[in-house]
Structures are given as structure tokens and as C-alpha cells.
Image: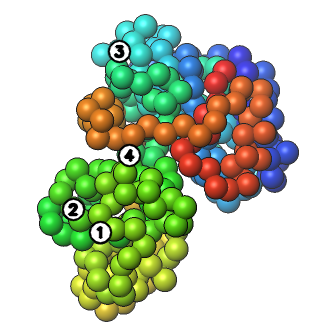
Amino acid sequence: MRAVVVRSFGGPEAVEVVDAEVPEPAARQVRIRVAAAALNPVDAGVRAGVFGGAGKQIGLGWDVAGVVDATGVATAWSPGDEVVALDYGMVKPLGSHAEYVVVDADAVAKAPATADAVHAATLPLNALTAAQALDLLELAPGRSLLVTGAAGGVGGYAVQLAAHRGVEVTGLARQDDAELVRALGARHVTEAAPGSVDAVLDAAVLGEPALAWVRDGGTYVGVIPQAAPAPVRGIRTTAVEVSPDGARLAELAALADEGVLTLRVAETYALDDAAKAHARLAEGGVRGRLVLVP
């Protein structure tokens, strides 16, 4: 099968498409024939060597939408099931940017019924990150939240999920994105005063400057593990480390079917054009996800 990997770190030119053996599922695993797989900023970080692994072949890709192709023992999935999954791992020999991927069965969920595979592939990593970050914030309905990077993949889902929970959301985004962010459910766009919100979900990775918007004793959640700024003014600071969770992913897929979550695709690329997709991601300004199609 074809798979997208890096064997040396660098820019988009480091991305290679290689021939690899089709992986076999072990007990409590499934093999998915990949129909679509989103490209995320974490893939660019892996490609650049941010997470280590020098001297190894590292497979790229965390998101997958496709069809179960084979299963190990002790799984509830069957060949032919249309699914989405999070293929978690910074440094792994193969990722979801391939023709087939093996994942743990409990990381898998039924794909949204109302979306094609390309759109479904934008859900797992970004929506799980947003949902798990909101869990850390523990905001009750009526409380106030500022989401930085509100027009991005994680930020957009965070706006929608928080608004769905009854939280009053302010989205921090470029003026050109104000209409989009309001459509996602933000009550305000870039209108927060210093110390005015109960919490910040920092999808744009602003770090310490984002604390200025939070009231004394509020909460900050970042999206890069072990990278939260030091607490000030009694603000609790932490960061989400996304984890695969098929049951939670099934809930998010259901919210997509209900129209609560918007699955946004910017462009699609053939798997063989993975380096071009990385180059487009590096240019910035992408609204929605770039998706690779084997």
C-alpha cells in the first residue's frame, strides 16, 4: 500500500509517499480502508521534528474516515462498517495518511450518516480536542468563554460545542472571519475586554497573553500538552492532551448529524500530492481542513 511518511525532518519537501506492507489488526483492533484523512497542524509539527524521532520512519496522519476492512478478535466492528477514528501518536511508523490504517477498536465510531467521508475525516482530532478541552474548563451554562483561533479547526468546533452547552462565547478571530465565527455560534467577535471572561480556550496558542482576558480566579486551557502558561491572579492554567475515545467520537458524530457541528473542508488532495497539501498548510489562512484522498 501507499503511505505518507517522513524519514528526515524539514519542510513540505520532506514528505514522501512510500510503499508499505498492509498492516494486520491484532486483538481489539480494526483495519480501516482509508477513504479520506485530514491534514492537521500536528502533522506539520511531526514533519518538522518537533516531537522527535530522528532516524526513524514516521507515518503522518491522525484523522481517518473509511470502511472497516478487517478485525482482530474481541471487537464489535464488522467489515463494511463506515467509520471514523483517531489514530493517536506523535511518532509511529505508519499513520492514517495511507491506504489502510490499524487502530484500536475503542477509538472507532460510526461515521456521521449525513456526511461524505471527506467531510467526516475533519471530525476526530479537532472535535475531540475541543470537547475534551471544554471538559477541563467545567463551564456551566451562562458562563463566559473566549475562544482564540475561533475560525480554525479546533476553535470552530469549540465555539459550536460551547454555544450548544449554553455558554456565552466570544470568538477571537480576524475581522474577515467575523461573520463565520458568529455563524458558528459566537455571541461576540474580538470584543472582549481585559479580565472580562470566565475562561479562555486558547486554540490559537497565544499562551501568556491570552490570560489578560480572564477574570481573577478564572480558567485557561491550551491545546499543547505541558505548554500552559504559569498561573497568575488565581487563574487555573492547564492544557488538553487529546485522547482517542470512540464513545465520545460517536457523540460528536451524532452532533454533526444534528447540525450542531459543521464539518468544514477547505481543499482535497490526492494521497500522492501530500507534499503539496503540506505546502498549502504552511501558507496559512486555511479555513476548514485540507483532506487527503487515497
Query: Is 47 in front, or is 52?
Result: 47
Furthest-left residue in this view: 141
Indicate the position of residue 239 as horizontal and vertical percent values: 41, 66
Q: How crowded is mark 2: few (under 14 residues within 10 Å), some or many (20 or more)?
A: many
**What is the spatial separation of the Cα atoms under label 4 and label 3, in whole angstroms?**
21 Å
Disc 2 and disc 4 in contact, CB within 8 angstroms: no
Question: In what element is the residue under mark 3?
Answer: loop
Instruction: Tell me what residue is drawn at x 34 percent, y 68 percent.
Output: 188
Q: What residue type is labelled 2?
A: Val
Number of the front mark, 2 or 4:
2
Q: Would you say residue 173 is visible in this rendering?
A: yes
Asked which quadrant contains residue 80, the reply is top left
Residue 167, numbered circle: 2
**Disc 1/disc 4 C-alpha distance (Å):** 18 Å
Q: Name the kind of residue labelled 1 in the image.
A: Leu
Q: Is residue 280 left or right of residue 31?
A: right
Q: Which of marks 4 and 3 is in front?
A: 4
Which badge, 2 or 1, comes first in the chain's sequence?
1
Q: Which residue is drawn at 46% across and 14% down?
A: 68
Please provide percent x and percent y for residue 161: 29, 50
Looking at marks 1 and 4 on the same chain, the residue that comes earlier in the sequence is marked by 4
Q: Residue at x 69, y 49 (%)?
A: 281
Say which label, 4 or 3, has the lower sequence index: 3
Q: Do the residues labelled 2 and 1 touch (CB within 8 Å)?
A: yes
Reading the image, the residue beneath label 3 is: 77
Query: In the structure shown, which secondary structural element does the residue marked by tag 1 occupy?
Result: strand
Residue at the spot of label 4: 128
Can you identify the residue that label 1 sits on?
A: 145
Q: SS for tag 4? A: helix
Camera-side residue of 114 and 103: 114
Q: How crowded is mark 4: few (under 14 residues within 10 Å), some or many (20 or more)?
A: many
Q: Which amino acid does label 4 sit on?
A: Leu
